[in-house]
Amino acid sequence: MDSYPDSNAYLQAILEELRASKQPLGFGHPPKARYIYANRQYPECLWYFWDGAKKAHEPIALHALTGIVEKLEIEEKEFRGKPDHKVNLHIRAERNYVIQSGLETLFAKGLLYTLSRLPVATFAQPITISVEAGDTEQVLFCRIYNPASGQAVFAPYPEQVNWQDVIAKAIVKIDAAHGRVGQPEQQSPQLAHSI
């Protein structure tokens, strides 16, 4: 007789999860996220990967990424001796990606505001995030689409926006869609004043 009455049910649940994950066997990429940088630093691409070993960018020719949004975070880095806040959007696709952009950019603001306006259920399904060049060589926009219908989400933000609230709302919705309960991480007072 089994000393743990629920052990069979537990083992069955593990087996079902492993079958559902469809983890590919054989050679492949390491399971760590690959960072995608969204900016117009290089004239031949709108976003790119960074190859640290070669100290060179790898242009991404396609302008859209479809996957499931897993997590949103704001990361503080240092740039030229000053704090520089980055938006990191974690996406699960054929592998894990993190789209990173400066918090002050039009790309990040469009991304954050649109994410904050989407219903919670959206984050349990794939969405398409696209980069779009602006009229000037520094401007990069973010567009979000429903990949099934091809319909773009239109969420223009007003001139006066409390970006800290927008970020918190987006984080709460993404976390709720993935069953993570809790409060969003508190932003530093410097962040509140910088956006």
Image (cartoon, rainbow, N blue to C red):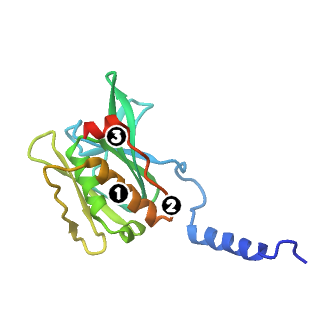
Q: Is 177 placed left or right of 113 in the picture?
A: right
In the rendering, which numbered label is found on residue 170? 1
Label 1: which secondary element: helix
Q: Nearer the viewer, residue 21 or 105?
A: 105
How far apart are the two marked residues, 1 and 3, measured between alpha carbons? 15 Å
Quick check: 45 above or below 62? Answer: above
Q: Which tag, 1 or 2, sits closer to the chain's start?
A: 1
Quick check: 19 above or below 101? Answer: below
Residue 59 x, y percent position in the rendering:
30, 43
Residue 22 placement: quadrant: bottom right
How far apart are the two marked residues, 1 and 2, measured between alpha carbons? 13 Å
Q: Which tag, 1 or 3, sits closer to the chain's start?
A: 3
Residue 63 visible in rendering: no
Instruction: Report the quarter where the N terminus lies.
Output: bottom right
Q: Amino acid at mark 2?
A: Arg
- Which residue matches tag 3? 86
Residue 30 x, y percent position in the rendering:
54, 48
Residue drawn at x 21%, y 67% is 152
How far apart are the two marked residues, 2 and 3, measured between alpha carbons? 22 Å
Residue drawn at x 50%, y 61% is 181
Residue 98 x, y percent position in the rendering:
40, 48
Q: Amino acid at mark 1?
A: Ala
Residue 47 placement: quadrant: top left
Residue at the extreme front: 189
10 Å crowding of disc 2: few (<14), some (14-19), many (20+): few
Label 3: which secondary element: strand
- Which residue matches tag 2? 180
Q: Nearer the viewer, residue 149 or 71?
A: 71
Residue 96 x, y percent position in the rendering:
46, 53
Residue drawn at x 21%, y 41% is 44
Q: Amino acid at mark 3?
A: Lys
